[in-house]
Image (cartoon, rainbow, N blue to C red):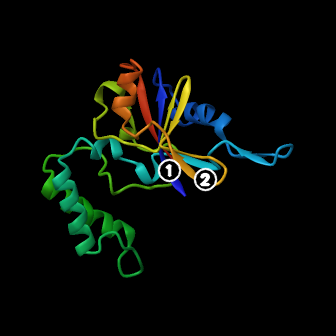
Amino acid sequence: MHYHCEVYLEELPKNVFEAISEIMEPYKLWLDEATGECRGFWDWFVVGGKWSGVHTVTTLDPLKVERFYKICEEKRLFWYGVKKPAKVQEAKRREEFLKLFPGFEGPIPTCRDRYRDEGYVDDVVSVGKVSPRLTCYTLILPNEVLHHKIWVGFGFCRTDFDGHVKKALEERGITTGYLVTVDYHR
C-alpha cells in the first residue's frame, strides 16, 4: 500500500530528497530477529509520488477539481496505451484543467511523473501556506511521528491524529518551516 506523508523541515535544504532520506531512514521497515517484530513503517518512498501536487490541489476550488476529475474520467484521459500515448493524454488533461483554471501557472497536479525521486516544486510548501484542507496519513515532525492509524499486532487502530495537517501544526505552535509531500510504500 502507498501512504501520503508530510515531512516537516525547519529550513529548505539544497537537496530536498537527501534531507528527506535522512529524516526517513530511522523509520525504514526492518525485522527485529530477536523479537520477530517488524519495526519502522516504509520500504520505499519518493518525494511527491501519487500525492504530487496535493499542496496545489488543496488551494483550488474543490468543486472545480471534482468537475475536472469527472471530465477526465468521462473522456478516459487517465488511460494510456498504444492508441493513447501518455504525452497525448497529459496534453488533453492540461487543456481541460486550464479550461477550469484559466491563468494557472506551474505543473498541473495530474500531469506528473509519479516515480520521480525529487518530486516537483509544489511538493514543498512553507508552513504559512498550508491549506486547512490538507490531510495526510503520516506527519513527521521534529520530535514525533503522527499516524492516522497504527498497527497494534492484529489490525489497525485509529489514533488521535485525524490527518488534518494545519490543525496539528497549530496545536504544536509550528508556524515556520516547510512541509514536503512524500509517497511511501509499506
Q: Position of residue 33 (x, y in %)?
A: 85, 46
What amino acid type is highlighted by mark number 1?
Tyr
Position of residue 2 measured from the top left corner of the image (x, y, whole percent) = 52, 55
Q: Quadrant of the N terminus?
A: bottom right
Q: CA distance from mark 2 to mark 1?
A: 8 Å
| Among the two numbered marks 2 and 1 on one chain, the one whose residue lies closer to the N terminus | 1
Query: Label 1 belongs to which residue?
Result: 3
Q: Position of residue 150 (x, y in %)?
A: 56, 45
**Which residue is most to the bottom?**
83
Say which mark, if any, is on residue 175. Answer: none
SS type, badge 2: loop
Residue linked to disc 2: 186
Q: Indicate left or right for 37 with 106 as reference.
A: right
Vertical position of residue 94 compared to residue 47: above or below: below
Contact, mark 2 vs mark 1 (Cβ under 8 Å): yes
Question: Is residue 14 shown above or below 121?
Answer: above
Asked if 98 appears above or below 22 in the picture, the reply is below
Image position of 75 with respect to 100: above or below: below
Tell me which corner region of the image, top left, top right, bottom left or bottom right, holds residue 126.
Answer: top left
- Which residue is nearer to you in this view: 63 or 159? 159
Tell me what residue is drawn at x 41 percent, y 78 percent. 81
Which quadrant would residue 95 be assigned to in this image?
bottom left
Give the residue type that dot 2 points to. Answer: Arg
Question: For the image shown, how many numbered marks are present on the structure?
Answer: 2
The residue shown at (65%, 50%) is 43
Categorize mark 2 by other alpha carbons within 10 Å: few (<14), some (14-19), many (20+). few
Residue 160: x percent and y percent? 45, 36
Q: Residue at x 35, y 77 (%)?
A: 84
Label 1, secondary structure: give it.
strand
**Closer-to-camera residue (12/132):** 132
Residue at 44% in and 37% down: 161
Q: Residues within 10 Å of mark 1 (few under 14, many from 20)?
A: some
